[in-house]
Amino acid sequence: MDVDVRQMTWTELAAVCTNLEKACTKQLRGEEAATFAQLASFYESRREPHSDAKIEELVALIDADLAGGYRSANEAAQAAEDRGSKRALLWGEKATKLLKSLLVRYEKQGAKLTEDTGVFVCEICGFVYVGDAPPEVCPICKVPSFKIHPVRKEAI
Amino acid sequence: MHAARNLRLCTKDCVCLFICPTGATNTETGQIDFDKCLDGCRLCVDACPSGAIYLVSSTYPKPQTTEDAVAERLFALANSKAAQEDLARSIAHGSDDPALRQICKVVEMSSRIIAEDLWRESGYIIAQSDAAEQLVEAMLAEYGAEEGFPVEAVQAFLNGRR
């Protein structure tokens, strides 16, 4: 199935490019990886932040995926016996639930949530962890912890 | 097909240096010299006691096809993940609270990783796929004239495929 680049948002275009960049890097094709990285940067540079964006809107989008998008995609993947897609949907849905939990906890606790501890993201599946050290193996995709990276607070 | 070294696994036992007929494994960078490596030779791969050397293919089979009914739902989720990344980025942009910006950064990174995986399963798993080639051609046609678009690199990529 083809996509229409004119219908895609800047971030969607960037995401398909960073995915292909990673695939090229894993094949040790540095030049092609650099081309996709440049394409991704081109699309990312076109983005303009929206004003007055709220956490509640973000949670609402996540809720919509959890209530509908993932279920309908899972049903289609099940009907097609497409294990690759089922795998991606399973990992993505689990990571999405953790993102929702992170946002809901942040709304309740504010800065206290991460005051004395770290936040980590798995570079493979998007697993999110709040704590002092990440688990030795990612609970979602089972990659070793050297691929689970801290995201630090930055002063402006 | 050439050999490559996984530096995280390499225990520097040097058996690859002993066995390599061309000296390709003996470099100052730690990585194998791909140009010196003999196509498909694999002597070092089999000799390595730590399993740190593997072969990198120069050609790949066509990826598995994804049914349209599945692909369209994966695209819809990838679109939603991109919207979430954008919102998180916008929230961070409008705030000077380091804790909120940290949480937003996490959402941005994780949403991107989830979206990439959805693209991977809908035909864009490798740059050699027909889907990826058509996408890059469409990007060049639509955005090639705009400032900052990497025209030469994209044309080199497309020429390399022909």
Image: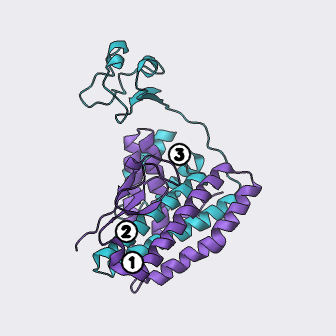
Amino acid type, residue under disc 3 in the picture: Ile
Instruction: Specify the quadrant of the image occupied by residue B100.
Output: bottom left
Amino acid type, residue under disc 2 in the picture: Lys
Q: Which chain letter matches label 2?
A: B
Name the residue nearer the viewer: B142 or B55.
B55
Residue that carries the numbered disc 2 in the rendered image = B105
The image's mark for residue B126 is: 3
Circle 1 packing at 10 Å, graded few (<14), some (14-19), many (20+), is many
Pinpoint residue B31: horizontal percent, then vertical percent. 32, 30
The image's mark for residue A32 is: none
* Disc number lying in front (3 or 2): 2
Instruction: Specify the quadrant of the image occupied by residue B36.
Output: top left
Q: Is residue B118 above or below residue A108?
A: above
The reply to whether residue B80 is in sight is yes
Q: Residue at x 67, y 52 (%)?
A: B66
Separation (CA) of disc 3 from disc 1: 31 Å
Residue that carries the numbered disc 1 in the rendered image = B90
Separation (CA) of disc 3 from disc 2: 27 Å
Q: Residue at x 37, y 60 (%)?
A: A41
The reply to whether residue A46 is in sight is no
Separation (CA) of disc 1 from disc 2: 10 Å
Chain displayed in purple: A
Circle 3 packing at 10 Å, graded few (<14), some (14-19), many (20+), is many
